[in-house]
Amino acid sequence: MSALLGKAGKRLFEQHLEQYSPQDPLYEFYINDRGKKKRRKVSAMAIISHISSPTQRAPPPGLSSRDAKILKSVQRRAHYLDKGFRILCFRFGWTFAIGLIPVVGNIADISLNYLLVVRKARQAEIPSWLLSRMLMNNAISAGVGFVPVVGDIILAVYKANSRNAALLEEFLRIRGDSFLKIQEQESASQGLQTGALGGVSEVDAEQVKPGAGISKGEVVPTANNVDSD
């Protein structure tokens, strides 16, 4: 049964992840008034207080405050591990710098990647198949990291932590969307007549866990009230 649930969850995830790419987790790009593409830092307040403005990126709607904070923490840590520094056109982070130390540096990288990013992501109650996918990214990063010099360069380009941050963000986006669909159906008093929760199957709901981490009395942001702030 657990294998069936895992396959269903992965199918749902893959449907949303077709355009996935390891973007910078701490910065976003936007078009200014002159039509030029610019980069700006994502504000911590956009995640913690769910405020959206022209200079902030709001978290996915439908998330608990807990999940929003976890996502922000993972994004921030991934940025500094993968892209915190820049020399000319080359962006790199602590994993590249530490990895230049033979053997000890690579072991330290493996530890930091797990302790600072993956372990934090697990606090959001992610399913085992998503955890495995994150660990696979770390394993690839660790493998190439043991190749002297060239491996460190590949590691800096691969950016396993940014990939894992993007995976977590997309998964939480699905969770938030599923929660809002369920809430919408409940408000329409349709109940469970269709055998699904707001168009979300019970199998998918068990994997995605809509509403996870929401405390009693917490007001969860929707797409409407996020956009209106």
Image: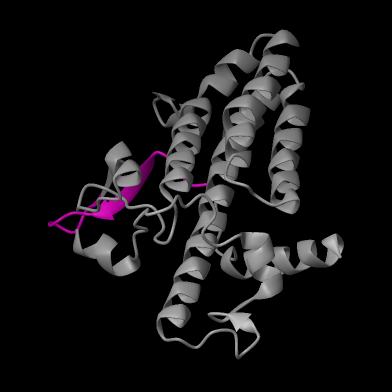
- Name the residue rendered at 75%, 52% in the picture: 129
Residue 17, how many percent across, how many down?
Answer: 59, 63
How is the protein colored in the picture?
one colour
Q: Is residue 33 magenta?
A: yes
- Name the residue rendered at 43%, 26% in the picture: 84
Can residue 101 be seen by looking at this rendering? Answer: yes
Residue 218, how many percent across, how many down?
Answer: 37, 53
Indicate left or right for 93 with 54 as reference: right
The image shows residue 78, relative to residue 128, as above or below, that is above
Report the number of numbered marks. Answer: 0
- Predominant SS along the magenta part: loop
Indicate left or right for 5 with 163 as reference: right
The image shows residue 74, relative to residue 167, as above or below, that is above
Q: Is residue 148 magenta?
A: no
- Name the residue rendered at 58%, 50% in the picture: 167
- Name the residue rendered at 50%, 74% in the picture: 182
What segment carries the magenta color? 22-37
The image shows residue 81, relative to residue 41, as above or below, that is above
Of residues 95 and 207, the one nearer the viewer is 207
Of residues 69 and 23, the one nearer the viewer is 69
Residue 216, how many percent across, how many down?
Answer: 43, 52
- Indicate the quadrant containing the N terminus: top left, top right, bottom left or bottom right: bottom right
Can residue 14 be seen by looking at this rendering? Answer: no
Indicate left or right for 219 with 180 as reference: left
